[in-house]
Image (tube, rainbow, N blue to C red):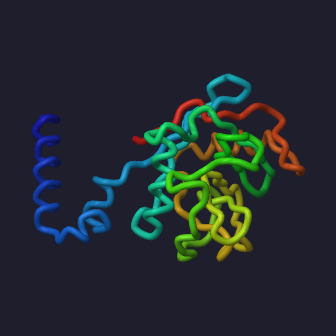
Amino acid sequence: MSQMVTDCHKRCRAALRAQLPAHHRITSPFLHAFIMSNVFFDITINDQPAGRVIFKLFDDVVPKTAKNFRELATGEHGFGYQGSSFHRIIPNFMLQGGDFTRGNGTGGKSIYGEKFADENFQLKHTKPGILSMANAGKNTNGSQFFITTVTTSWLDGAHVVFGEVVEGFDIVKKVESLGSASGTPKAKIVIAKSGTV
């Protein structure tokens, strides 16, 4: 039975793709769930497994930013998030990571080159669990990102929101508890493995 369902899903996807104009085949709401994979991080705290965080990315609104994050998670360009750390953690604010070149918030790079422009600011920092690009000012997106642990509306219009946590927010909260007012983590928080699910 499960094989029949799988075969049906494959036929349905192929049929839907064939019916849509080429320029709609990726962004169509129909196919979004089939085509765009979620991203996972397996987190360790002081080298001990802490659990998995899963993100949904908003490809329909910010496809370029979502693609950057997803492909850094898979490491398909020969570099990416796996093995990098969360270098800045501020309780009641956010967790910041993604600097896989220097590990201290001064490095990182995108799949498009060192930096790329802000895609748009349509999505807002409306709740805990929002995934957004860290930057050093306008149009300086690279690989660094942050996960909010509270609503951070003052960041709207300055940082590009491109996803949200859909599973493992308890892991995010556990990591948050190891932060400090200065942002220096009290433990080594590492993305031990990353990819798509």
Q: In this rendering, is residue 26 above or below 102?
A: below
Give the quadrant of the C terminus: top left
Horizontal and vertical percent for residue 67? 45, 55
Q: Quadrant of residue 151?
A: bottom right
Give the residue displayed 66% in from the left and 33% down from the top.
190
Residue sitting farthest toward the top: 48
Give the residue displayed 17% in from the left and 41% down from the top.
6
Q: In this rendering, is residue 30 above or below 2?
A: below
Residue sitting farthest toward the right: 182
Q: Nearer the viewer, residue 101 or 40?
A: 101
Horizontal and vertical percent for residue 98? 64, 46
Give the quadrant of the N terminus: top left
Left or right of 50 in this view: 103:
right
Left or right of 140 in this view: 42:
left
Query: Total label count?
Result: 0
Q: Quadrant of residue 86?
A: top right
Give the residue displayed 78% in from the left and 56% down from the top.
92
Q: In this rendering, is residue 11 above or below 163?
A: above
Left or right of 181 in this view: 36:
left
Horizontal and vertical percent for residue 35? 30, 54
Horizontal and vertical percent for residue 178? 79, 39
Q: Quadrant of residue 49?
A: top right
Q: Nearer the viewer, residue 103 or 53?
A: 103
Give the residue displayed 72% in from the left and 68% down from the top.
137
